Amino acid sequence: MARMTDQPARWTRATVYADMWVDPDDDPRESEGPDPEGELATLLDYLSGYRATLRMKCEGLDAEQLARRSVPPSTMSLLGLVRHLAEVERDWRGWITHDEPLPKLYGKRDADFDGAVADQAVVDAAHADLEREQAATDAALAAHPDLGARPGKDGISIRSLMVHRIEEYARHCGHADLLRECVDGRVGQ
């Protein structure tokens, strides 16, 4: 089978297991401690791990690489994923209030992907937006420690919102694996 010359070679930083992103001892998502106690702590631990995975998939790339689209006609890119997740974190806060939805960060539908252009200012803003929106959503949810509570106008439980957040990050981390491999051949873990 002929190898396409415009595709990056597969590579990894790992030395113990060639198919891993990093060696297990160097993986910031791994801890030596016991599993979290309780359902909420477990959900937060999974969410934290997926957030760290997304950051890892974006590390070491320049603005052009982060904004690089996967395959036409898709507009998906690593930068687009960062912007998209900032947008959805913002939207999720609306699920636990009776307020009107917050205005969109990036404008019209799919502007989070369409506006993900190879500009360092856009990259920096996207990462700042994601961190700010994550912190705001985390703070809003911390006010509702009962996972069965249904505080918003739509009656969605805090548990459902937490599981949905994990699902959203997990799905997009899978996309990030493939996007990163297309950019520079680095394989996922």
Image: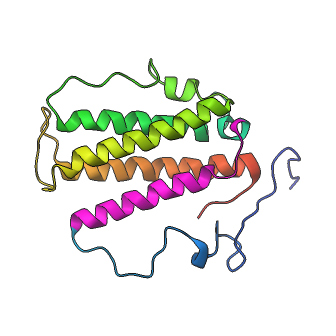
Residue 3 in sight in this render: yes
Residue 74 visible to the viewer: no
Residue 132 pos. (x, y %): 41, 40
User: In the picture shown, does residue 24 fall above or below 155?
Assistant: below
- Name the residue rendered at 17%, 42% in the picture: 156
Residue 50 position within the rendered picture, expressed as x and y whole percent measured from the top left: 45, 57
Q: Quadrant of the N terminus?
A: bottom right
- Quarter of the image where the C terminus is located: bottom right
Q: How many marks?
A: 0
The quadrant holding residue 42 is bottom left
* 68 with respect to 160 (left or right): right
Q: Is residue 54 above or below residue 152?
A: below
Q: Give the image quarter of residue 18.
A: bottom right
* In the image, residue 55 lies in the stretch drawn in magenta: yes
Q: Is residue 163 left or right of residue 56?
A: left
Q: Residue furthest top?
A: 108
Look at the magenta stretch and give its main secondary structure.
Answer: helix
Structure colour scheme = rainbow
Seen at 10% across and 49% down, the residue is 149
Residue 146 in the image, given as x and y percentages of width and height: 12, 56
* Residue 48 percent coordinates (x, y): 40, 59
**In this picture, residue 125 sits left or right of residue 107:** right
- Please tell me which residue is depicted at 22% across the width and 66% down the height of the picture: 39
Q: Which residues are magenta?
A: 39-63
Residue at image point 72% right, 42% down = 62
Q: Nearer the viewer, residue 98 or 122?
A: 122
Q: Is residue 1 magenta?
A: no
Residue 177 position (above or below residue 152): below
